[in-house]
Amino acid sequence: ALFPTNDPDLAIDTGVYGEKSRLSSTGFNAAWKVSNALSIDVDAHHSTSTTKPNSPFGTYSTMDLGLFNQGNAVAYYDQKLPLLSLPTTTLDRSKLQLTGSQFVNNMADQTVDQFQTRGTYRLDDDNKLLAGLGFTKVKNRAASYNNQNNDWGGVGARADYANVKLFTEGLGGFF
């Protein structure tokens, strides 16, 4: 695409993401051969899990910026991954404008209590009686907060975020 006025916007996103989960689990299993004819198995289990933000900025927070001096754009589709080249774009911080933000907090708590028992009673060499019971109690709680502000036209004035550090990196080093 050729932009003779070099004034279309180039979308730039920055963000901080962090979430951590913790699982605690305790169980008990027993097999008891009461007699040659009767055996009993018991399985009891208690698990808790917690997921919460791992950042002072929430689960994730993003800032969307428009750089209003994108130069010409060239896309190459002849490789395994498409490549975008911006040969005439200059990263000019005075042309940055906020175009959106999103702040999200997620949390979840889960508890599982489980109990199972089964028994086998041999009536004779060819016949047996199988019986069992199982109980499961699950408690889930999840909450999420999302504060999102998007504005394609921009929020505030250009250069309000002139102190944002801009840099370019080749993606090859990430693979």
Image: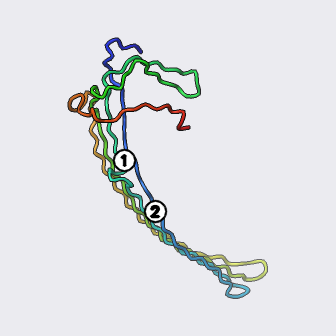
Instruction: Give the residue type at disc 2.
Output: Arg
Helix, strand or loop at label 1? It is: strand
9 is higher (above) or lower (below) than 115: above
Which one is in front, 135 or 85? 85
Task: Determine the residue located farthest toward the right in the rendered image.
Answer: 125
Task: Determine which residue is flagged by label 1.
Answer: 60
Helix, strand or loop at label 2? It is: strand
Residue at (33, 48) in percent of width and height: 104
Q: In this view, does 44 lie to the left or right of 1?
A: right
Q: Give percent across and percent down for residue 81.
A: 55, 28
Q: Give percent across and percent down for residue 116.
A: 56, 74
How far apart marks 2 and 1 lie (CA) works out to: 18 Å
36 is higher (above) or lower (below) than 53: below
For marks 2 and 1 on the same chain, the one whose residue lies earlier in the sequence: 2
Number of numbered discs present? 2
85 is higher (above) or lower (below) than 42: above
Residue at (41, 53) in percent of width and height: 19
Q: In which quarter of the image is the N terminus?
A: top left
Q: Give percent across and percent down for residue 119.
A: 64, 79
Is the Cβ of the residue at disc 2 closer than 8 Å to that at disc 1? no
Residue at (72, 83) in percent of width and height: 123
Q: Is residue 120 left or right of residue 20?
A: right
Image quarter of residue 54 = bottom left
Q: Give percent across and percent down for residue 134.
A: 54, 72
Instruction: Give the residue type at disc 1.
Output: Tyr
Task: Determine which residue is flagged by label 2.
Answer: 22
